[in-house]
Image: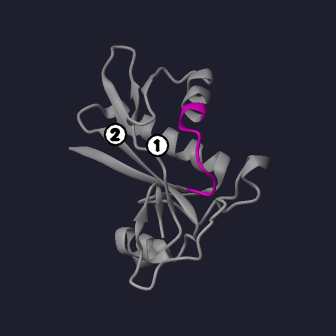
Amino acid sequence: MSSDLVALVRRDPDVHAVADGMIAMGEPVELRGGEPEPTLLYDAEGRLLVSIEDAVHVTAQSEIRRLLGAEFADRVGVPVWWVDIRAVADLPEALRVARVFADSLVRWLGGTVYPDGASEAPARSWRAAGQGGGDAGGGAPAGGAAYQGNVIR
């Protein structure tokens, strides 16, 4: 079984750029996969540590509330990009690497990490200062949230 984190960030994340930054800063991981497959981080022995799913744009507050609970949802404004980050359970290093990755996304793009994220952190990158994600829709349809492509409305 895996340990799961969810990064809720303000801009469409460039997962490869963040992972490359971790590597450049000395994190001993190897990056594989991505688009359309999950991005995978391996250790020096070739063992899978972390799987990172493609980001999903969420514009419906009700979906965050439904999936993560009302208390957490009240601390997160929409729209956000939802990124699932899964650490392999039987390798202690995996959860640390997953946490470093999730925290790095939030540091550069603003947002928070579930389950234990504090109030939303401001974005550190000038590119994320506009927040939002260029939402072209007008919110959720009358019947509730709907998944369309990589957007939940």
Q: Give the range drawn in magenta.
A: 9-17
- Tell me what residue is drawn at x 40 percent, y 64 percent: 147
Where residue 13 sits in the image (x, y, percent)?
58, 45
Tell me where residue 86 appears, x and y as whole percent.
35, 43
The residue where tag 1 is placed is 99
At numbered mark 1, what does the secondary structure look like: helix, strand or loop? helix
Q: Which residue is painted at 36% across and 68% down in the image?
A: 67
Q: How crowded is mark 1: few (under 14 residues within 10 Å), some or many (20 or more)?
A: many
The residue that appears at 46% across and 71% down in the rendered structure is 72
Q: Which of marks 2 and 1 is nearer the N terminus?
A: 2
Q: Is residue 13 left or right of residue 125?
A: left
Q: Residue at the far right: name it.
A: 126
- At label 1, the amino acid type is Arg
- Callouts 2 and 1 close, C-beta under 8 Å: yes
* Magenta-drawn stretch contains 13: yes
What residue would you read off at disc 2?
Answer: 87
Task: Give the quarter of the image for residue 85.
Answer: top left
